[in-house]
Amino acid sequence: MMPKIFSIIIFSFIASNLFGQEKNRAGFFIAENPAQLEIIDQYQQKLSDQDKLFFRPFTPWQIIKGHILLSDQFSAAMEVEFAGKTYFFALDEKGRLVSDGEPGLIFKFADVEKTPGDFQVIQNKAVLFSKIPFKEKNNKYKRTYLEKGQKVQTVFKMGSDFFVLLSGSKKQYGWIRPSGRLSLRKESGADEVQGSATVIEADVLNQLSNKVEAVNRVYKKLFQKLNSEKNQNKPAPYWSLESNATGIVLELQNNQSGKFKKSIPYFVNEVETLFSGNEYEIYSSGSAIEIVKK
């Protein structure tokens, strides 16, 4: 059976000439079903179907050269890299990808910013996820919000969107669109950052700690009363305080009922009053507050 030939759908994104040649920029090739394409290894041997099962749907391949001739000086291919290894995608005489099956959606992104890093979602309904680019419409792939605590590994950035690998038992590639500064927390080097001195002055930090302790005491007493009246043992919500080398992050924990929505703006206002002035920037979103020194 003659192999089917599929054209590459190309989305070109023009970057500034200033950054076009920087090492942190590259082109990427992504296929919905890469195992259906003819893939050649670094020794220029064709991969078996079993070997190709290693590659997940929408695996990102960094493009090294868009069109080269293999060692036989006859066969054309696109040279790519994945997980530190070189591979080749076979091309026909017209420069189209060669496939024995249905590779599905295929994308090629030119000159995007590489952004390798490990992050964690710190709020529900704050990071939108899609298996395909957000500009694409496809009923097969619905957009969903990532749950708080979900870890992601970023690969590259395009506009305000990131292409990532979701960590966990069901690893999958796709796109995320964070809603703001309080959507993700960087995981890399987290231990070192936790132990470093914050840029917030000690006296101001102490005042904030006192406010946090005071409001947490109110929540605790309120829940003790409610638990006693209703014969239950629900944990009281509380504001956690995390200081690091860039500032402070406050998060309302154990807020499962949503009954504290009205109290949150009051607390945010108290924090903003404490840090009023030109030295600090305050970002609030839902049940989290971030304080950063300018």
Image (cartoon, rainbow, N blue to C red):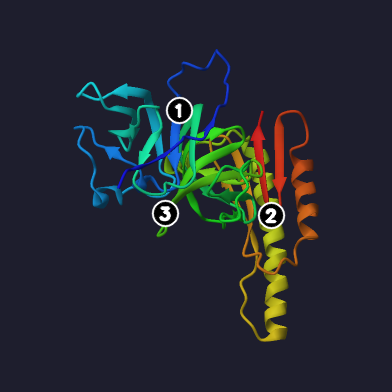
For badge 1, the amino acid type reads Gly
Residue at disc 2, secondary structure: loop
Q: Nearer the viewer, residue 90 or 139?
A: 90
Labelled pair 1, 3 in contact (Cβ < 8 Å): no
Q: Is residue 285 left or right of residue 156?
A: right
Mark number, residue 287: 2
Which one is earlier in the sequence, the residue at label 1 or at label 3?
1
Crowd rating for badge 2 (residues with CA inside 10 Å; few <14, some 14–19, many 20+): many
Residue 208 or residue 113, whichever sits in front: 113
Tag on residue 43?
A: none
Secondary structure at numbered mark 1: strand
Query: Are the residues flagged by discs 3 and 2 in contact, CB closer than 8 Å?
Result: no
Instruction: Give the residue at mark 1.
Output: 27
Place of residue 144 in the rendered image (x, y in percent of width and height, measured from the top left): 60, 56
Residue 266: x, y in percent? 80, 53
Up/down of 125 relative to 177, above or below: below
